[in-house]
Image (cartoon, grey):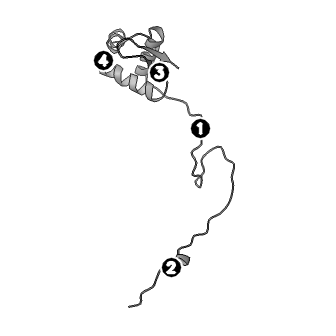
């Protein structure tokens, strides 16, 4: 049985030193570039967003009652809209209000 030693020179990998000025990710690009991607929201989230635009002080139970949807669905819509950056809660849960961006 023959044993081979692995040496550093055997493991050397040649890398290309190319500089590419790109605006989108290529398969060899390790930097994440920003793309203008449209935000898609559901009809329920649209209803909640419109209600918040009309009444920034609205609570989840109020939005649920006016739009005939459950309170948990409204809370999920709040979370989804906050995650994509369309709304922001200013102040506390009790005395704060919603800011639509």
- Say which of marks 3 and 2 sits in front: 2
**Furthest residue toward bottom:** 1
- Say which of marks 4 and 3 sits in front: 3
Label pair 3/2, CB-CB below 8 angstroms: no
Q: Is residue 19 above or below residue 86?
A: below
Question: Residue, x 46% and y 26% (percent of image)?
Answer: 41
- The residue at which mark 3 appears reads as 87
Which callout, 4 or 1, points at the residue further toward the start of the chain?
A: 1
The image's mark for residue 7 is: 2
- Say which of marks 1 and 2 sits in front: 2
Q: Is residue 97 above or below residue 26?
A: above
Which callout, 4 or 3, points at the residue further toward the start of the chain?
A: 4
Dot 1 crowding, Cα within 10 Å, few <14, some 14–19, many 20+ = few
Residue nearer the viewer, 32 or 39: 32
Q: In 3D space, how far apart are the residues under numbered discs 4 and 1 (Cα atoms)?
A: 34 Å
Dot 2 crowding, Cα within 10 Å, few <14, some 14–19, many 20+ = few
Q: In 3D space, how far apart are the residues under numbered discs 1 and 2 (Cα atoms)?
A: 43 Å
**Which quarter of the figure has residue 45?**
top left
- The residue at which mark 4 appears reads as 71
- The residue at which mark 1 appears reads as 35
Which callout, 1 or 2, points at the residue further toward the start of the chain?
A: 2
Look at the image and tell me in which quarter the N terminus lies. bottom left
Residue 70 at x, y percent in the picture:
30, 17
Residue 27 at x, y percent in the picture:
58, 54
Label pair 4/1, CB-CB below 8 angstroms: no
């Amino acid at each position: 049985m023959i044993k081979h030693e692995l040496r550093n020179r055997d493991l050397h990998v040649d890398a290309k030193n190319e500089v590419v000025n790109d605006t989108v990710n290529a398969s060899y690009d390790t930097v994440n570039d920003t793309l203008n991607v449209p935000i898609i929201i559901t009809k329920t989230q649209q209803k909640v967003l419109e209600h918040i635009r009309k009444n920034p002080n609205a609570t989840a139970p109020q939005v649920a009652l006016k739009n005939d949807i459950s309170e948990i669905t409204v809370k999920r819509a709040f979370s989804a809209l906050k995650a994509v950056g369309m709304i922001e809660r200013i102040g506390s849960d009790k005395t704060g209000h919603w800011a639509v961006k």
